[in-house]
Amino acid sequence: MKALKTIDTYYPIYYHSSWLNFEQKHLLGWQVKPHEACEYEFEYSYNEWLARKYSFRSSHLAISQGYGAVGIQWHIGGGCYVITNAQDAQKAEHGIELNSKDHLYLVFAYRHKDLWDGRPLMPRMKAFIQYLEQMPANPIVTIYTRATDVNGIEKKHLSLTGMLPSKNATDATLDRVYRKYFGATDWKYKDCEGKPFLKFRYNPQYPL
């Protein structure tokens, strides 16, 4: 008998008829609040730890036919969100088969245009990482991301998240912010564009 999916791998499925034109969508699962986290089973222990403090929903950005990005959308406060997944940096950037248990990929962080309270996103993302650093028996050894302009036409699917557009969110600006604010450095693995991923400064207090 096939095991049931855990709450952090139960991604929404995009049912699309082949005779219709493809429409990009952002599909979200039901919201799980911190006081409800104990009611569910998790595939990844670090997601279970994060769920004790942050509410989340599973996320599926359907980008094109047969191609999408899945992950967990965390509400890090005041209408700010970060989507993470268990992406293996040596494999494809997006996909359903995400099986890394020791690398956490920060897919996309944003402020929601209707929900944002006006306070900065980056300190909230840093608090998110600092909370993960406190996890007992912490399996995560690397937190990484890409510095990618979210305003290009090829990134138009990101607007489906309800993000607040920002002209400052360019490759160069994000790279500078990540390096200065998060102590990010070039990692040995490269993204789909041949650029090194950025590995954040990360110091787990109780590594596995």
Image (spheres, grey):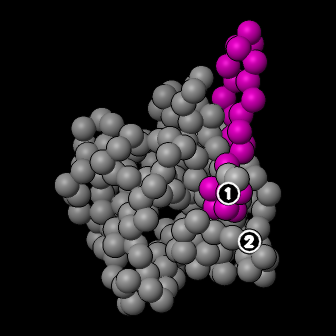
- Is residue 133 something that shows in the picture? no
24 within the magenta span? yes
> Residue at label 1?
3
| Depicted 24 relative to depicted 75: above or below | above
Q: Residues within 10 Å of mark 1 (few under 14, many from 20)?
A: few
Q: In this view, does 115 lie to the left or right of 81?
A: right
* CB atoms of marks 2 and 1 within 8 Å: no
Q: Is residue 98 left or right of residue 193?
A: right
Residue 52, image x and y in percent? 66, 81
Residue 160, image x and y in percent? 67, 39
- Is residue 20 something that shows in the picture? yes
Residue 33, image x and y in percent? 77, 73
Magenta stretch: helix, strand or loop mostly = loop
| Depicted 73 relative to depicted 90: above or below | below
Amino acid identity at mark 2: Tyr
Numbered disc total: 2
Magenta region: 3-27
Q: Residues within 10 Å of mark 2 (few under 14, many from 20)?
A: few
| Depicted 136 relative to depicted 166: above or below | below
Secondary structure at numbered mark 2 = loop
| Residue that sits furthest to the front in the current view | 1
Q: Is residue 56 left or right of residue 121?
A: right
Identity of the residue drawn at 24% across and 38% down: 194
Q: Tell me, for residue 40, which label it has, or none.
A: 2
Tell me the quarter of the picture where residue 117 sits.
Answer: bottom right
Q: In this view, does 97 lie to the left or right of 12?
A: left
